[in-house]
Every structure is written in structure tokens, then in C-alpha cells.
Image (cartoon, rainbow, N blue to C red):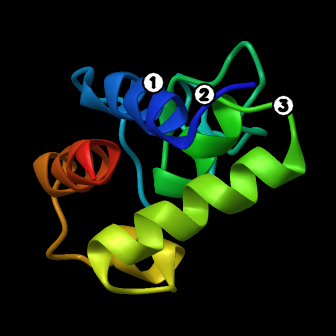
Amino acid sequence: MTTVAEILNRAADRLSREGAWTQNAMAKDADGTQVPPRYATACQWCSKGAIRAETKYFYDVYVAEQALASAIGNAAIAAWNDDPARTQSDIVEAFRKEEKL
């Protein structure tokens, strides 16, 4: 079984690539079209989309999202991700913070 720390670490790695983070969509392809997070054409993800891209089971998504919500002090992960003041560095830092707890 995959641990929460492993899921968050892989999601952070995914989001840390230049241009890999997005807002207002779970995932996008190279044309900017919204696609499901696990699609092979996806190349940008929001926080929740990155978690979904790294997991196969609903329970793992739930537990990883709960851990991230705890790390950011906000249960509304999508709203936190989509805040216009948020940066890619903020996102990756939150994932890395939680994986170390």
C-alpha cells in the first residue's frame, strides 16, 4: 500500500516541473484544454489533480487530501490552489511540508 507521504512526494515532484501547475482546472493538456488528471495528455495539474494523478484508489485520494488540508490549514484545497496570489512554489512547499510531518 502506498503511504500518504509517498503520494504527496510524487505529487510534489509532478507539480515542481516548470509549467506543471495550473489553477481553475484539475488538469490541462498542452493546448490548455481541461482533461482528467490521469489522462496521458495531461501536463498541468492543480493540487487536487496532482494527488489524483498519483493514486488509483479513492481512499488514498481522500487521505492525501486530508493531509494536505491539514498542512495548509484549509479544507478548501481547490479554493486555496486557485487563489490568484498563490504561486507554484507555495503549492510545492505545502506538499513537501506535509510529507515530512
Question: Which residue is tagged 1?
Answer: 10
Instruction: List x then y, in percent, for residue 7.
Output: 54, 33
x 36%, y 41%: residue: 21
Does 95 sit left or right of 27 as displayed?
Answer: left
Report, in whole angstroms, how far the alpha carbon at label 3 lies from the one at label 1: 13 Å
Quarter occupied by the N terminus:
top right
Task: Kindly indicate whether the residue at mark 3 contacts the one at mark 2 (C-beta within 8 angstroms).
Answer: no
x 25%, y 28%: residue: 16
Image vertical order of residue 97 relative to residue 29, above or below: below
Give the amino acid type for the residue marked by disc 1 in the picture. Arg
Residue density around tag 1, few if under 14, some if 14–19, many if 20 or more, within 10 Å: some
Report, in whole angstroms, how far the alpha carbon at label 2 lies from the one at label 3: 20 Å
Does 74 sit left or right of 84 as displayed?
Answer: right
Kindly tell me whether residue 22 is visible in this rendering. Answer: yes
Residue situated in front as seen by the camera: 71 or 40: 71
**Which numbered mark, 1 or 2, is in the foreground of this view?**
1
x 23%, y 76%: residue: 84
Residue situated in front as seen by the camera: 32 or 14: 14
* SS class, disc 2: loop
Please give the label number shown on residue 29.
2
Give the amino acid type for the residue marked by disc 3 in the picture. Lys
Which of the 4 image quarters holds residue 39?
top right
Residue situated in front as seen by the camera: 91 or 64: 64
Question: Which residue is tagged 3?
Answer: 56
x 58%, y 62%: residue: 65
Give the mark, 3 or 1, whose residue is nearer the N terminus. 1
Image vertical order of residue 79 relative to residue 24, above or below: below
Does 15 sit left or right of 34 as displayed?
Answer: left
Give the amino acid type for the residue marked by disc 2 in the picture. Asp
